[in-house]
Every structure is written in C-alpha cells, then in structure tokens.
Image (cartoon, rainbow, N blue to C red):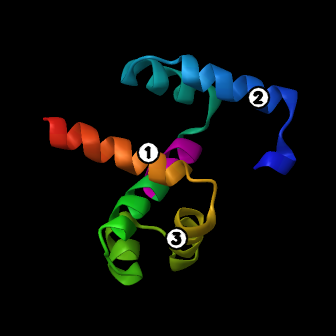
Amino acid sequence: MQKYETESLKELHKALALLQTEEEVAAFLEDVCTIKEVLDMSQRLSAAKMLNAGVNYQTIAKEVGISTATISRVSRCIQYGSGGYKIVLDRLQETEEAK
C-alpha cells in the first residue's frame, strides 16, 4: 500500500483511527461506502477468519458466497500482505476470548 500513499489516503487512515465505537464505524462506512462495498469487505473478513481456522476454499466459497479467486486474494494478503488481516484477526480473537 505504501506506493499508493497520498495525503487524502493518510487522512482516511487518521479518520478511521479516530472512530471509537462499532456504531461510529458503522455510520462512517455507511456514509463513505456503498452497501456492496461494505458487504464485500465483511465477506473478505469472514473468509480471512475461516482461512485462519484452516477451512478449505470450497467450504468458504459456499458458506460466505464469494469466489475462490477472492478467497485466494485474501489468502495471499494474509500470507504476504502488510499484516492488516493479522492485526484484526488477533484482536477479534482477543475480544472473543475476553467474553
């Protein structure tokens, strides 16, 4: 992502970091993204969680409703990306374990 860094992208990163509750995040995403974009992101996160749990592509495709090509892209990002999925997956697991 570094090669695409622009001032407006940096500002978006700062804006996301300022959001403090799930409700604030939901409101911002609803305003800034289309419903399809938000749903696509949620499907990718679901796929990432399932990949992390060792679920195979076919099962993920069927349960989440995305293509194996998208699952492959998510898998590559988990393995070779910037670490964003790992941060989120680790923190989600921490919050689930704290319940």
Q: Position of residue 21 (x, y in %)?
A: 39, 19
**Dot 2: within a 10 Å radius of its alpha carbon, few (fewer than 14), some, or many (20 or more) residues?**
few
Dot 3 falls on a residue whose secondary structure is: helix
Residue 7 sits inside the magenta stretch: no
Is 41 situated left or right of 21 in this image? right
- Residue underneath mark 3: 75
Q: Are marks 3 and 2 in contact (CB under 8 Å)?
A: no
Mark 3 or 1, nearer chain start = 3
Mark 2 or 1, nearer chain start = 2
Whether residue 68 is visible, yes or no, is yes
Residue at figure coordinates x 58%, y 25% from the top left: 16
Q: Position of residue 55 (x, y in %)?
A: 31, 75
Seen in the picture, residue 96 relative to 15 is either above or below; the reply is below
Whether residue 40 is visible, yes or no, is no
Mark 3 or 2, nearer chain start = 2
Residue 37 sits inside the magenta stretch: yes
Residue at figure coordinates x 50%, y 53% from the top left: 85
**For residue 10, which numbered disc appears in the image?**
2
What's the amino acid at mark 2? Lys
- Camera-nearest residue between 54 and 59: 54
Identify the magenta region.
36-43
What's the amino acid at mark 3? Ser
Residue at figure coordinates x 29%, y 68% from the top left: 53
Dot 1 falls on a residue whose secondary structure is: helix
Q: Position of residue 58 (x, y in %)?
A: 38, 83
